[in-house]
Image: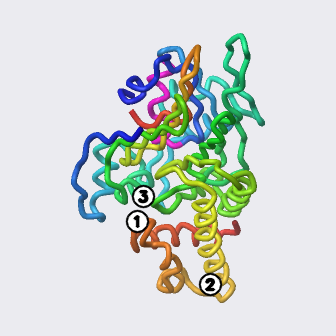
């Protein structure tokens, strides 16, 4: 927040949340209480307010601070305009199909050809597929394909975590998703167990740039969890 | 513009996710991601008055766009 204050000459009037996870909207309340509107997927509040224990991940989901929830719900493609006399477009919001979660949106800043994709895309680490909030690997690949079709030039993609990428980075990310998916699907068709699948090191060529072997194993296990349940 | 502030040593991967989850109130998935990164704050200017702010410690990337009448953020990250 101090960094934001040091950069922006104007107060923050609008916060757009790409999905419901706390590491993306935890500071919403700070801005909302200072008068900012918060925009997010129409299902964001429902997911953020669940208080559940995800046994498989030993992950206890706590309710979000109600002040961090959207005051403007995104129900479809939306344009955000400056409100100034010229009425210029600031951002275009696109609701995504269930991918990282069922609360995903992407935000395009047209003037700069910059897209914030949220956790649909991760750089330097494997993505998390939030099966427990309606996530889908199939949806992730489909939405990454949609972004690839847009980013054929100098467009830049801001991932949820990691460094900004372009077309080459997108292609590499898609290749990783598809390769691990294909290996998991083949293993399921063969009747392999999860342990056999993990022993085959299905993320081996991607581990070096995505956090190492242990991270690859976690991601492979996550992929297995969803695909073996029908995603 | 690139600006880097702060730094801290990396810990062994196994206990770090639990440590971050416990101490910083992160979810386990966020903490698991965080352990794979060196925790530093980086600011990159993508265009005039448009920045991406990364903290490397499990908080999501913040896109900040400062326009007349009020700034816009895509994701606010964690406090």
Separation of residues labelled 2 and 3 (CA atoms): 26 Å
Residue A43: percent from left, percent from top: 67, 38
Separation of residues labelled 3 and 1 (CA atoms): 21 Å
Separation of residues labelled 2 and 1 (CA atoms): 24 Å
Residue that numbered label 2 is attached to: A187
Q: Earlier in the sequence, mark 2 or mark 1?
A: 2
Q: Residues within 10 Å of mark 3 (few under 14, many from 20)?
A: few
Residue A83: percent from left, percent from top: 68, 15
**Marks 2 and 3 belong to one chain:** yes
Q: Is residue A5 left or right of residue A170?
A: left
Residue that numbered label 1 is attached to: A211
Which type of secondary structure does the marked residue at label 2 adopt?
helix
In front here: B35 or A161?
Answer: A161
Residue at image point 52% right, 50% down: A164
Q: Are marks 2 and 3 in contact (CB under 8 Å)?
A: no
Colouring chosen for the image of the structure: rainbow
Q: Chain of mark 2?
A: A
Q: Main secondary structure of the magenta part?
A: helix
Q: Earlier in the sequence, mark 2 or mark 3?
A: 3
């Amino acid at each position: 927040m101090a960094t934001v204050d040091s950069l922006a000459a104007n107060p923050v009037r609008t916060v757009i949340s790409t999905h419901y996870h706390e590491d993306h909207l935890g500071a919403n309340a700070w801005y909302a209480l200072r008068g900012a509107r918060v925009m997010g997927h129409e299902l964001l509040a429902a997911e953020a307010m669940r208080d559940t224990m995800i046994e498989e991940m030993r992950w206890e989901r706590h309710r979000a601070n109600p002040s961090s929830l959207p005051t403007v719900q995104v129900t479809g493609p939306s344009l955000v305009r400056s409100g100034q006399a010229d009425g210029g477009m600031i951002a275009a919001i696109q609701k995504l199909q269930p991918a990282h979660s069922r609360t995903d949106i992407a935000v395009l800043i047209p003037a700069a050809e910059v897209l914030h994709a949220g956790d649909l895309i991760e750089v330097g680490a494997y993505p998390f597929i939030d099966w427990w909030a309606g996530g889908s690997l199939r949806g992730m690949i489909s939405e990454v394909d949609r972004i690839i079709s847009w980013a054929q030039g100098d467009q830049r993609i801001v991932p949820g975590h990691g460094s900004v990428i372009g077309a080459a980075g997108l292609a590499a990310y898609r290749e990783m998703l598809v390769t691990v998916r294909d290996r998991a699907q083949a293993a399921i068709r063969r009747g392999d167990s999860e342990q056999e699948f993990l022993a085959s090191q299905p993320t081996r060529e991607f581990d070096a740039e995505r956090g190492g072997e242990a991270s690859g194993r976690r991601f492979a296990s996550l992929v297995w969890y969803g695909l073996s349940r029908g995603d | 513009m690139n600006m880097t502030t702060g730094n801290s040593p990396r810990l062994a991967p196994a206990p770090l996710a639990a440590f971050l989850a416990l101490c910083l109130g992160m979810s386990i998935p966020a903490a698991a991601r965080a352990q794979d990164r060196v925790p530093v704050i980086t600011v990159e200017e993508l265009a005039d008055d448009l920045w991406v702010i990364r903290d490397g410690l499990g908080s999501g990337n913040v896109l900040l766009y400062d326009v007349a009448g009020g700034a816009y953020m895509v994701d606010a990250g964690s406090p």
